[in-house]
Amino acid sequence: MAINAPGPTGTNLVGVKRLLVVVVHETDPSARLGAWLRDAGLELDERHVDAGGSLPATLDGFDGLVVLGGPQSAMDDKATSPELVGVRAVLRQALDADLPTLAICLGAQLLAEVGGGKVRKGIDGPEVGALLVAKRDAADTDPLFRPLPLTPDVLQFHHDEISELPTGATLLASSPMYANQAFRVGRHVYGMQFHIETTPEIVHEWAERDVVGVAASPYDRETICLLSDAAHPHIEEAWRPFAGRFAELVRARTQQAA
């Protein structure tokens, strides 16, 4: 997708801070994460690229970036998933500017690829359902990850894996299946292979759509949904404050830039 819509003029140095939120596919909206970020005082400008929404020419005027997931693959070329061309471009800009960024699932894979890492089909198969990740030692000094529990609840639904992190990235969390679950590039750009934004209804839809992923799980679709329903309050308990800390990072970064 071409990046052809002009962004806002000037940087928002005072008042409400603005995030560009890239919804890569309608099946993964910002959902609870979007609500948490708004509750933390941020203004969200959502662009739905799968529905033909355009992305800004630059990130000028935005104080942060969120890129969500979708069924596409980070390995798709321009002909297969033309909408990912623009997504890669805004991630490249965010990396170059060290702009506060949260890239989730496919977003994290695209971030890894843009930053010089590698993505491949998961060698141990899909990772599906309500699971845990474990913080790595580097998380103890990270402003967003430090307050999280040692093994926070997350939601997984991916077939590809980040096999190599971006150049200079710091690994923050791993799972038993795939090591590269969360990472930071620079001081402000974060990628997370797992989901924190979902609602039970979203996961039910994914479990209905992703027959291959569900078949690779030790549980049937109904059990995956039941476990997901039970996990969502725990996910909110851990990750809603995380969203608040990201909002603080956005504000602090803007003050530094000013």
Image: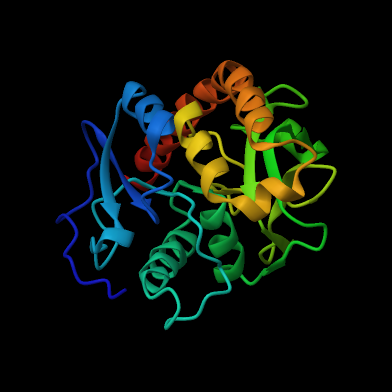
Q: Nearer the viewer, residue 130 or 96?
A: 130
Viewer can see residue 196: yes
- Image point (46%, 67%), residue name: 92
- Image point (42%, 28%), residue name: 32
Seen as rendered, the residue at the extreme bottom is 79
> Quarter of the image holding residue 124?
bottom right
Up-down relation of residue 251 to residue 226 (above or below):
below
Report the side of 173 relative to 19 (left or right).
right
- Residue 97 at what x, y percent from top left? 43, 60
Viewer can see residue 164: no
- Residue 193 at what x, y percent from top left? 63, 48
Q: Quadrant of the N terminus?
A: bottom left
- Image point (21%, 31%), residue name: 15
Q: Nearer the viewer, residue 47 or 96?
A: 47
Up-down relation of residue 58 to residue 149 (above or below):
below
Up-down relation of residue 125 to residue 82 (above or below):
above
- Residue 131 at what x, y percent from top left? 72, 33
Q: Nearer the viewer, residue 33 or 246?
A: 33
Q: Quadrant of the C terminus?
A: top left
